[in-house]
Amino acid sequence: MLERFTTAARSTVLAARAEARQLGHPQIGTEHLLLAMLHPDAGTAYDVLSAAGLDHARVTAAVTRLVGTVQPFGPADTAALEAIGIDLEAVRARLEETFGPGALDPAPPPPRRGLFGRRRAEPRTGRFGPRAKVVLELALREALRLRHNHIGTEHLLLGIIREEKGLAAKVITDAGIDLRDLRRDTEAAIGGHDNPA
């Protein structure tokens, strides 16, 4: 299936992994695919979503509100450190200024060893969650339905719309956007583009 993905669609899938990692989420969900589509290089999906009134900051805020982010220190830890005069955010900012972004990210686990000390396959991080897998499958089905020989960002967006139960669809509808209207706008945009995005 991946061989059918356009360059923009592949970049969007990789960006979804980065979005999940940035929010500290262990799996890539439909919300991360949606966030990745809100980058200007996401082609048709970006155009349609922007025209509908969605932007990256707004969707990030909605996802954070609904799911949260995974932080190494909880509110109790932060309060305890503040009680003794340590501003955790100032420390974090200073460390990242000195050592670069992600300086406080957890270290990767040591290589796993199997029989006779051979390396075992590494557990993959950033796997697609069940709903995101459904979206990818539905993107293929949408491309086939439209008789396209490629899967572009527009098909990924149609997959999110068709799946309609994931967090991405909830964020879209919570923003006051009707999924049927968004589908219509996406299909109209596909008709207006000669080159795949």
Image (cartoon, rainbow, N blue to C red):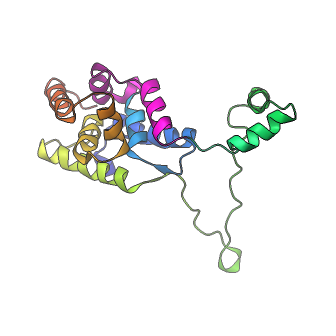
Give residue 81's quadrant in the image.
Answer: top right
Residue 33 lies left or right of residue 143; in this view the side is: right
Magenta extent: 39-68
In the image, is residue 165 above or below residue 12?
A: below
Q: Residue 169 appears in which quarter of the rendering?
A: top left
Q: Is residue 73 above or below residue 86?
A: below
Q: Give percent across and percent down for residue 176.
A: 28, 27
In this view, the residue in front, 2 or 36, is 36
Q: Is residue 24 above or below residue 56?
A: below
Q: Is residue 57 magenta?
A: yes
| Residue at point 47%, 24% (across, down) | 57
Magenta segment includes 118: no
Q: Quadrant of the C terminus?
A: top left
Q: Residue furthest bottom?
A: 115
Q: Is residue 95 left or right of residue 49?
A: right
Q: How many marks?
A: 0
Image location (x, y in percent) of residue 90: 77, 27
Task: Please report the residue visible at 41 percent of the width from the left and 37 percent of the height from the top.
Answer: 11
What is the x, y in percent for residue 48?
26, 25
Q: Quadrant of residue 85?
A: top right
Q: Main secondary structure of the magenta part?
A: helix
- Residue 21 location in percent, x, y? 55, 43
Q: Which residue sits furthest right?
A: 84
Q: What residue appears at the point 68 percent right and 37 percent down from the top-left corner?
A: 102
